[in-house]
Image: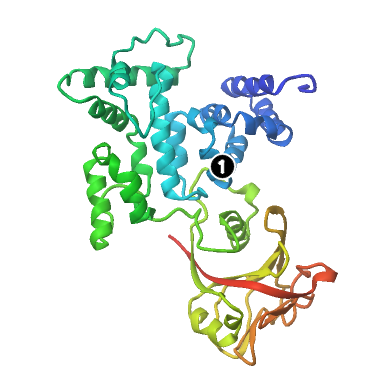
């Protein structure tokens, strides 16, 4: 019998760690489920602490997956918080290796520099301004004694402490070098191998010049040369680094990567809760084919000009004067066949409020239905899913119940006006 009714969140988390280390499988399973289901606020408030501990535990997959999912969904806000600076190096290395972080690469670079500075500060109790180096302060970094170190810190902190000490000894042997050189070398060693996880090719040339080039001497030469060859002549990568963009970014003015992650799970016919989020997931490339920029773009000629013969596509529609988003997935693609496309994999969907992803609906094609998607450019008909389930004629749309499971809009919303439309090709990446 386990009763957590009078236990603090901290005590419950400690119990999880203990039961896992003792290999008490039933207690571990129950406790991590209890934390995920009932203590989300505490997990979020102590997120780095939770991350740093649960990934040491082999039998805590549920809470690991929950944490990884949150890191991916909330990467922008998490990496801009002070709490993220408390991540241990091995945990940060795992996170930076994920393909589905919803954050731009230059923001990860900014965080990595700040995290590296913070590691020095935590162990040596000094302050560094990333943008300005005071020579006296920098010198004091390497001559401070280490009496402030807490002997009660865990093994990981002791390893970090020993690692930094070795860096200091190595750098102090270079007495003729400038203080700025010393701090640069220290950071270079601390950020190895994390710096290899940054996907520099996803960073714009402007951001590279302003934010990365100043750290040129801190970046391993083979990486820097690889980046420069890409910017100058567009060569493929020759170093052992991830070469594909993270699946976390999408070129859309309507949705963000959180929406696309849900759509990806629907394409795979998987419930996100059952995915093993520690592995690489969401291996789809979403390429923008068509975007309406004016009312004149809502016509079938322009739609088919850009969208035909591009394979599987997903259509996103922003409803005018509303937070609602609707759309449909065409697993075959358009090619102006002037006939019905049949596929058991097609679906239509809606997000009642694009700010609240819990309010989403998916409606799949009914079994044995022959009317998945009508492919034509007659009149000004842009879309016809299910012969009435989702129709868009110019900017005027209708959603009803015909050949899909249910209507994706409420009864009083079935007639709508589109404000914007985007079409993406969907390609599975090996």
Residue 393 x, y percent position in the rendering: 68, 84
Give the camera-side residue of 21 and 191. 191
Residue located at (28% from left, 23% from top): 135
Give the camera-side residue of 18 and 164. 164
- 267 with respect to 116 (left or right): right
How busy is the neighbourhood of tag 1: few (under 14 within 10 Å), some, or many (20 plus)? few
Residue 191 placement: quadrant: top left
Residue 215 placement: quadrant: top left
- 148 with respect to 36 (left or right): left
Residue 214 x, y percent position in the rendering: 29, 42
Give the camera-side residue of 167 and 13. 167
Residue 310 x, y percent position in the rendering: 48, 77
Question: Which element type, helix, strand or loop, lies under badge 1?
Answer: helix
- 178 with respect to 12 (left or right): left
Q: Residue furthest left?
A: 176
Relative vertical location of residue 202 with respect to residue 374 in this rendering, above or below: above
Residue 255 x, y percent position in the rendering: 60, 60
Q: Is residue 323 visible to us here?
A: yes
Q: Is residue 330 visible to us here?
A: no
- So how many labels did they put on this image? 1
Residue 168 placement: quadrant: top left
Quarter placement of the N terminus: top right
Quarter placement of the C terminus: bottom left
Residue located at (65% from left, 53% from top): 271
Relative vertical location of residue 149 with respect to residue 44 in this rendering, above or below: above
Q: Label 1: which residue? A: 77
Give the camera-side residue of 13 and 20. 13
The coloring applied to the image is rainbow
């Amino acid at each position: 019998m386990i009763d957590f009714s009078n236990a603090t969140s901290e005590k419950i988390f400690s119990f999880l760690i203990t039961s896992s280390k003792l290999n008490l499988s039933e207690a571990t399973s129950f406790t991590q489920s209890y934390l995920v289901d009932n203590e989300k606020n505490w997990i979020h408030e102590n997120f780095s602490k939770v991350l740093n501990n649960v990934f040491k535990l082999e039998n805590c997959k549920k809470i690991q997956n929950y944490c990884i999912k949150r890191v991916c969904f909330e990467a922008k806000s998490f990496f801009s918080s002070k709490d993220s600076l408390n991540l241990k190096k091995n945990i940060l290395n795992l996170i930076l290796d994920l393909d589905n972080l919803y954050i731009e690469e230059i923001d990860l670079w900014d965080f990595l520099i700040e995290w590296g500075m913070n590691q020095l500060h935590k162990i040596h109790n000094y302050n560094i301004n990333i943008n300005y180096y005071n020579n006296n302060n920098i010198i004091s970094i390497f001559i401070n004694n280490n009496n402030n170190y807490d002997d009660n810190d865990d093994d990981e902190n002791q390893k970090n402490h020993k690692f930094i000490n070795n860096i200091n000894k190595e750098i102090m042997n270079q007495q003729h070098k400038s203080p700025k050189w010393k701090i640069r070398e220290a950071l270079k060693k601390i950020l190895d191998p994390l710096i290899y996880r940054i996907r520099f090719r996803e960073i714009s040339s402007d951001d590279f010049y302003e934010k990365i080039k100043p750290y040129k001497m801190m970046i391993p030469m083979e990486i820097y040369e690889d980046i420069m060859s890409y910017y100058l002549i567009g060569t493929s990568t020759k170093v052992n680094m991830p070469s594909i963009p993270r699946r976390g970014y999408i070129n859309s003015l309507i949705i963000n990567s959180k929406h696309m992650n849900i759509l990806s799970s629907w394409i795979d016919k998987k419930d996100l809760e059952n995915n093993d989020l520690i592995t690489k997931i969401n291996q789809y490339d979403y390429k923008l084919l068509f975007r309406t920029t004016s009312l004149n773009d809502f016509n079938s000629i322009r739609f088919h000009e850009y969208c035909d013969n591009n394979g599987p596509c997903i259509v996103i529609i922003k409803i005018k004067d509303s937070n609602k988003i609707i759309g449909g997935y065409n697993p075959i693609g358009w090619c102006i066949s002037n006939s019905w496309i049949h596929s058991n994999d097609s679906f239509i969907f809606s997000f009642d409020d694009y700010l609240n992803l819990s309010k989403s609906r998916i409606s799949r094609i009914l079994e044995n239905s022959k009317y998945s998607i009508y492919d034509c450019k007659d009149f000004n008909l842009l879309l016809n899913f299910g012969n009435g389930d989702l129709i868009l004629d110019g900017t005027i749309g209708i959603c009803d119940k015909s050949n899909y499971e249910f209507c994706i809009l409420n009864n009083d919303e079935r007639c709508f006006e589109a404000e914007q439309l985007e079409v993406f090709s969907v390609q599975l990446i090996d």
